[in-house]
Image: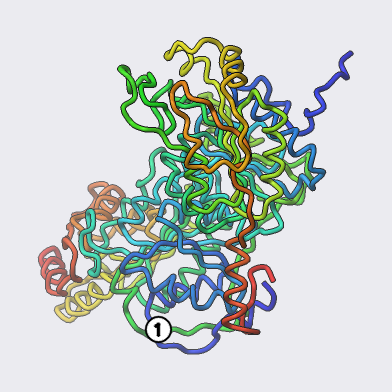
């Protein structure tokens, strides 16, 4: 019976199992969605690259059997920018956490979206900094308990789809790790987009955030995701902020076309310089 | 990158050090530069923003220096030769990715056109006060290489050397240029492509499955790959084994860090370049680098006229430091004089290498101008007595 294997094994570095994720962690489910997404696409996996920053989700690059880069904290997007604009034959996916991408990496996030660099950003939002022991982050809800907000968080959190939309992302979706099929489909759609696409995946952190905030087990949270979620495709992103005890709005909020950084760079110089322009790699 | 020769402006030019640096990068095969504007380095990227679209290169102005210093490393792993350009305050931000390049062995070039500091300091005026930052600025133990030009021509030549050393040793390499070399106009001869030596990236000959990214074999420098070729390799800034996987053990750390240091330390003689002048009978040795070497040479010429037996050791390579050369000179020299536009940085390295065998005198200058030659001459004459 030794030949029974998970059909997604070829997409994983099985020699790195066991992984570091806790029991009930949402990162593993997100990775599973990602493997199903790329499996559904029938693409040349030699041309698919994954880049992560630092944190629990930042470890994902190390488990995916692709060319993979585990960069520095917050800097996955600018690393991926350098790779993507010089290698338009590659599809570059940035897979990282909410703190990595939108706190320390927030400046890079907004500028890569503004430029419309051809990147797919998969952001696992577990509402806190988990790798370092559960500190408050830019997505922690008001009154959320974290080690650095022991009496509760006084800061309003980011509404990540609104952030991504407002700075120019061509595709914006949000799902939870309960909605695995929809999440996998959204990742596949995002990868197929030409430009800066963004998928937020809400995920439980049972070891730290759930425990400190007495939110029960990961299973309880999956049930909560099921009960409190409302699917509203094309919902205006300024209405999808996550409030305490409110409905969680999910869906594909933005899906539009916009030329990429590299297309704009080449087109502008071709128009202005004529035959004197030589495209990179050309 | 068709037709490299066409991208070279072979001929005689009258340009400044910043522009010469840009042309040197082009000559070295660099076609991707990410940067952020900062005085006195901006002319380098302005020149490239103009030149690159004509020759198949890309310059992108990033949102900050942190982004610039990691975007180039994405470019490297896509197969490009890459550089970023900044000055002290930007270099401070880039230190995160000097460490990443050292740890992941990503060959890339950091140009620092130095100005006065600390903090915002003297944006338009010279200093040589980032010498120790270049060596030690990022956390952890690692080695880098740093070269210091003293003329626009040398800015061109040494920029090419920076790229070649980066490829040869898979390490970040600094061009530590002084503001007044960056802004100095001078004759720069750009040779024909056939006369320029460039070191190509050494890609593995092993097929996927047999390749291990950090298996360095016997020469301590592992072969490279690039994204998109089917190797499915993993690169991390964490301590890693030969496969490139993170391994958090003291043994793995010892093995990796020792190799990163050894690959430079065991090749100091091949890396180090100095300019020797009148050293054969020297009882006093002036050790200098960059713009200060030009002022020092004037002072030395004056001292020679006064019969002082003084010679000049100009450091073209600042890091790794040429310990052996200094040690050897210390056998005959009575004193070393170290002028630099800082409050004393390289003088500590000279003291360490001399190890008490001769007197060592610094001629410090807080920055904002070059030394007056008399400041150096006075110390030479004092120790030559």
- Is residue B241 visible from the viewing direction of this image? no
Q: Is residue B309 left or right of residue B272?
A: left
Q: Quadrant of residue B2?
A: bottom right
Q: Position of residue B199 (x, y in %)?
A: 61, 64
Image point (71%, 49%), residue name: A192
Q: Quadrant of the image for the C terminus of chain B?
A: bottom left
Q: Is residue B228 left or right of residue A235?
A: right
Q: Position of residue A144 (x, y in %)?
A: 39, 21
B249 shown above or below B275: above
Label 1 marks a residue whose chain is B
Seen from the viewer's position, the closer of residues B121 and B355 is B121
Disc 1 designates what residue?
B15
Seen from the viewer's position, the closer of residues B232 and B299 is B232
Q: Is residue A98 left or right of residue B293?
A: right
Image point (63%, 69%), residue name: A280
Q: Is residue A150 left or right of residue B270?
A: left
Seen from the viewer's position, the closer of residues A84 and A260 is A260
Image point (70%, 32%), residue name: A182
Q: Position of residue B234 (x, y in %)?
A: 64, 39
Q: Position of residue B175 (x, y in %)?
A: 41, 63
């Amino acid at each position: 019976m030794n030949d029974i294997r998970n059909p997604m094994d070829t997409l994983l570095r099985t020699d790195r199992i066991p992984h570091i994720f806790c029991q009930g962690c949402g990162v593993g489910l997100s990775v599973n969605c990602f493997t199903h997404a790329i499996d559904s696409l029938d693409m040349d996996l030699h041309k698919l690259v994954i880049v992560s920053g630092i944190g629990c989700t930042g470890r994902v690059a190390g488990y995916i059997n692709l060319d993979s880069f585990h960069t520095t904290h917050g800097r996955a997007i600018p690393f991926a920018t350098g790779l993507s604009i010089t290698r338009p034959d590659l599809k570059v996916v940035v897979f990282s956490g909410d703190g990595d991408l939108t706190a320390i990496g927030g400046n890079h996030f907004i500028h890569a979206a503004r430029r419309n660099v051809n990147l797919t950003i998969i952001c696992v939002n577990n509402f806190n900094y988990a790798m370092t022991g559960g500190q408050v982050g830019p997505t922690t809800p008001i009154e959320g308990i974290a080690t650095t907000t022991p009496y509760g968080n006084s800061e309003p959190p980011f509404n990540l789809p609104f952030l991504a939309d407002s700075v120019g992302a061509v595709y914006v979706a949000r799902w939870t790790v309960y909605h695995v099929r929809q999440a996998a489909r959204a990742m596949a759609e995002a990868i197929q987009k030409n430009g800066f696409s963004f998928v937020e995946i809400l995920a439980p952190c049972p070891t730290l955030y759930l425990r400190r905030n007495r939110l029960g087990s990961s299973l309880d949270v999956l049930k909560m995701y099921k009960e409190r979620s409302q699917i509203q495709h094309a919902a205006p992103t300024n209405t999808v902020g996550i409030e305490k005890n409110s409905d969680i709005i999910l869906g594909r909020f933005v899906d539009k076309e916009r030329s990429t950084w590299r297309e704009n760079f080449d087109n502008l110089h071709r128009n202005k310089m004529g035959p004197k322009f030589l495209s990179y790699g050309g | 990158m068709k037709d490299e020769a066409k991208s070279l402006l072979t001929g005689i030019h009258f340009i400044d050090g910043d522009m010469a640096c840009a042309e040197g990068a082009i000559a070295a095969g660099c076609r991707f530069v990410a940067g952020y504007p900062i005085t006195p380095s901006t002319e380098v990227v302005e020149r490239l923003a103009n030149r690159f679209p004509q020759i198949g290169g890309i310059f992108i102005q990033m949102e900050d220096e942190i982004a610039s210093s990691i975007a180039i490393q994405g470019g490297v792993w896509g197969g490009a030769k890459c550089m970023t350009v900044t000055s002290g305050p930007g270099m401070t931000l880039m230190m995160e990715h000097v460490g990443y390049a050292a740890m992941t062995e990503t060959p890339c070039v950091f140009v620092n056109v130095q100005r006065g500091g600390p903090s915002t300091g003297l944006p338009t005026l010279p200093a040589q006060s980032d010498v120790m930052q270049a060596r030690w600025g990022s956390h952890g133990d690692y080695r880098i290489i740093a070269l210091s030009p003293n003329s626009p021509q040398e800015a061109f030549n040494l920029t090419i050397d920076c790229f070649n050393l980066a490829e040869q040793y898979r390490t970040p390499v600094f061009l530590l240029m002084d503001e007044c070399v960056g802004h100095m106009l001078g004759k720069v001869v750009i040779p024909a492509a056939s006369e320029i030596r460039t070191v190509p990236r050494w890609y593995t000959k092993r097929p996927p499955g047999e390749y291990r990214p950090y298996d360095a074999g016997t020469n301590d420098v592992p072969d490279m790959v690039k994204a998109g070729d089917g190797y499915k390799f993993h690169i991390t800034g964490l301590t890693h084994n030969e496969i490139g996987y993170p391994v958090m053990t003291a043994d793995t750390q010892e093995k990796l860090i020792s190799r990163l240091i050894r690959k430079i330390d065991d090749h100091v003689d091949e890396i180090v370049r100095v300019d020797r002048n009148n050293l054969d009978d020297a009882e006093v040795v002036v050790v200098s680098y960059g713009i200060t070497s030009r002022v020092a040479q004037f002072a030395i010429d004056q001292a020679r006229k006064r019969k002082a037996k003084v010679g000049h050791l100009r450091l073209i390579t600042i890091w790794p430091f040429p310990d052996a050369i200094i040690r050897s000179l210390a056998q005959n020299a009575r004193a070393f004089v170290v002028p630099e536009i800082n409050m004393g940085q390289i003088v500590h390295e000279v003291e360490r290498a001399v190890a008490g065998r001769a007197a060592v005198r610094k001629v410090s200058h807080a920055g904002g101008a070059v030394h007056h030659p008399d400041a150096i001459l006075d110390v030479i004459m004092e120790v030559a007595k």
